[in-house]
Amino acid sequence: MVVLVAILILDLALIIRRPHVPSMRESSLWVGFYVLLALIFAGIIFLLGDVQHGTEFLAGWLTEYSLSIDNLFVFVLILGAFKVPSAYQQRALMIGIVLALIFRGIFILAGAALIERFIWIFFIFGAWLVWTAWQQVKPGGHEDQGDSWLIRKVKQVLPFSDDYDGGKLRTVVDGKRMFTPFLLVLISLGATDLLFALDSIPAIFGITQSPFIVFTANVFALMGLRQLYFLLGGLLERLEYLKYGIAAILAFIGVKLILHALHENELPFINGGEHVNVPDISTMMSLGFIVLAMAVATIASVVKMRREAAKAGETLHLGANEKAHGE
């Protein structure tokens, strides 16, 4: 944990000292470095621990990584809505990621305590994930965050300038001290992190009940997310079927949680307080489903992008031919 925190502090220090838009090469190297760290950590768990915990970490990390990419998609909408200058998007993203770590850490501690005392909480977690999966796929699942209820209330209470002042939170306009739109960006990112923590923590507790694995999987999933933002660029918006893959994962884990709650049932009004004989989904099966869902969603999105690009190319070619023929 000390090593991970040190790496994050170093990453943040680099942003503060040299705000810039990272190149594709820089972003690729950082993303590859963080993914490699996660795989090395998984290998250490397999070697020093056992196959069960190693598999739980991989499944948890992949689940949280996919949900983090979904989180990143909303970050794209927020930064676009507030027109954050490119040079300071890194700072906003890093602060958003740190806030996500804090919120998830709090929910992990609370979730672990609840599960230890009340196994029936899995019924609520499972139902929440299934509902969240539906919210993912229904129209308007990702809405613009630029003028949300929270932001409107904050604007009513605090004075804000119209323009940014670098990466500062406060500035002076006509002799008056005011907050910059950068504070609104951070509030929006924090609110988004809070909502995503409500989804991601129940999801990973459906894979493992070890608070250590839950937290480390979340940390590794969030590390490199800032660089991934610049690496993918506008590609996130074009991965049309990604949300269906994420929804499938959430629904699958939601059903798994409900089945586990039935299997360990202690509620007197269900089967007389006795355990219900239902199938128990293994961690290996969960890992296989997560990989398959993300692979199918990504491949389908890429295939559709290529078809649309080819169709656009054909239309352009036909238009050029018609123009040449007319001349």
Image: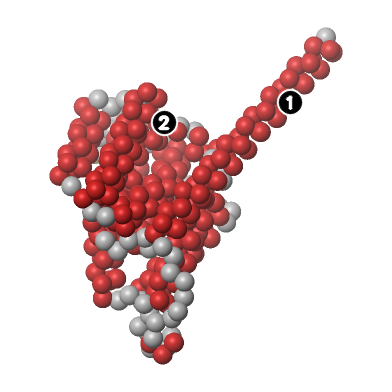
**Residue 103 seen in the figure:** no
Taking the image as shown, residue 293 lies to the left or right of residue 21, namely right
Residue 167: percent from left, percent from top: 28, 33
| Amino acid type at mark 2 | Leu
Quarter of the view holding residue 227: top left
Sequence-wise, the earlier of marks 1 and 2 is 2
Q: Which mark is residue 231?
A: 2
Q: Quadrant of the C terminus?
A: top right
| The residue positioned farthest toward the right in the image shown | 326
Q: What's the CA distance linking mark 1 and mark 2?
A: 29 Å
Which sits in the foreground, 138 or 294?
294
Please tell me how many numbered marks the rendered image carries.
Answer: 2
Residues 86 and 269: in front is 269
Residue 104 shows which numbered tag? none
Nearest the camera: 46 or 270? 46
The amino acid at mark 1 is Thr
Q: In the rendering, at what x and y percent does residue 127 appear? A: 45, 69
The foreground one among 184 and 55 is 55
Q: Badge 2 local density, few (<14 within 10 Å), some, or many (20+)?
A: many
- Where disc 1 sits, the SS reads helix
Residue at image coords 19%, 34%? 10
Question: Would residue 307 appear left or right of 193 to someone viewing this image?
Answer: right
Dot 1 corresponds to which residue?
315
Circle 2 SS class: helix
Q: Identify which residue is drawn at 35% across, 50% down.
A: 58
Establish if 303 lies above or below 19.
Answer: below
